[in-house]
Amino acid sequence: MTTLARSVAIDRRPPPAAPPDARRYVNRWREPEALGTETVTAFVMILRTRGCYWADLKGCSMCGYAKDTLGRSATPEELAGQIDRLAEEYRGEPYVKVYTSGSFLDDREVDPESRLRLLGAFRGARRLLFETLPEFAQPATLGPLRDHFPGELEVALGLESTDPVILERLINKGSPPSEYLAAADRIRSLGLRAKAYLLLKPPYLTEEESIRDVLRSVGEAAPHVDALSINPVHIQNGTVVEHLYRRRRYRPPWLWSVVEALRQGSALRGSARLVSFPTAGGLPRGPHNCGRCDREVLGAIESASLTQTFDGLERLDCRCRAEWAAQRALEPLGIEA
Ligand code: SF4
Ligand SMILES: [Zn+2]
């Protein structure tokens, strides 16, 4: 798997971009989010950077974000061009999310001055989120950012699973879960918010095993974070997961599994928020049910995530629920297309 993962990672990294491309961010959009009990609009951006260094070395089995990167470090001037364009399109949304297809705190992706420039451009936000690998979440890096930003900073970590074997062997992450949890503790001790992503259905786990993995992870990670996001796998180009999917050895998770993980996880989350906003929900390459109920189930998942009221999930039903229940146990014997 390591050899396959490495060749996939090299294949999906684009050639170095010419300067005009490097001044263009990858994407931006708006989406509903919650600040406490209030539903608000979040302004979300993806910066074009060199991307995740781990994707060059091995890469995670479900991650295809390297395709959105530069293939080299962006200069401070190029990042300034991206930030300035985004600032022009910002309408004062109270929640801002910054993605880089890697780690915002890795100097090779975003240099320290550019980080401060970005925080300054969005200093009107009440909360600003960015993602990082745990090794970059250090007091010397986080302290100046905290001091520069009047609102809350939320640091998101791709923990994925608290099982070291699943994390290392199936997901192919470079650090054990203990390093993610220690980083979350450092983040919170500095007065920042910590959020962890949990992956629903890494390759080689059945639907049942993946639900159990997420539930155990919710219980073990909750004391270390302010929020947990259950991220069901969607098939990204050039990944190990896509390799298996094309050979009919992987089905994206059912939305019923997300419902189950939220329903049972809500009792294990302690004081942490528990949310899920599935990417590509209802699509063949994303988490999906039968097609008839997907829209309603996705709506209930979003509503539960925003309000932290999980009762609405109990009332959902569809004929496909029985099929999901059967596949939870028998999936290795009968994967559907
Ligand atoms: S999931 Fe995160 S750590 Fe893994 S290759 Fe993608 S960006 Fe890097
Ligand atoms: Zn259905």
Image (cartoon, rainbow, N blue to C red):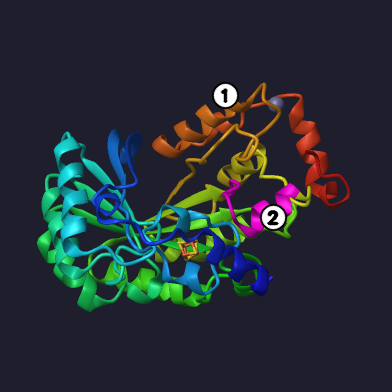
Residue bearing mark 2: 243
Query: Are the residues flagged by discs 2 and 1 in contact, CB closer than 8 Å?
Result: no
Which quarter of the rendering shows the N terminus?
A: bottom right
Q: Which mark is residue 296?
A: 1
Q: Is residue 189 left or right of residue 167?
A: left
Q: Which mark is residue 233?
A: none
The residue drawn where x is 22% and y is 73% is 141
The residue drawn where x is 78% and y is 47% is 248
237 is within the stretch colored magenta = yes
Q: Is residue 319 left or right of residue 267?
A: right
325 vs 112, nearest the viewer: 112
Q: Residues within 10 Å of mark 1 (few under 14, many from 20)?
A: few
Query: What range of the chain is rendered magenta?
Result: 233-246
Vertical arrangement, residue 131 with respect to residue 128, above or below: below
Q: Is residue 254 left or right of residue 281?
A: right
267 vs 183, nearest the viewer: 183
- Coordinates of residue 12 in the picture (x, y in percent): 52, 58
Q: Residues within 10 Å of mark 2 (few under 14, many from 20)?
A: some
- Coordinates of residue 132 in the picture (x, y in percent): 36, 65
Residue 60 appears anywhere in the view: no
- Coordinates of residue 81 in the picture (x, y in percent): 17, 51
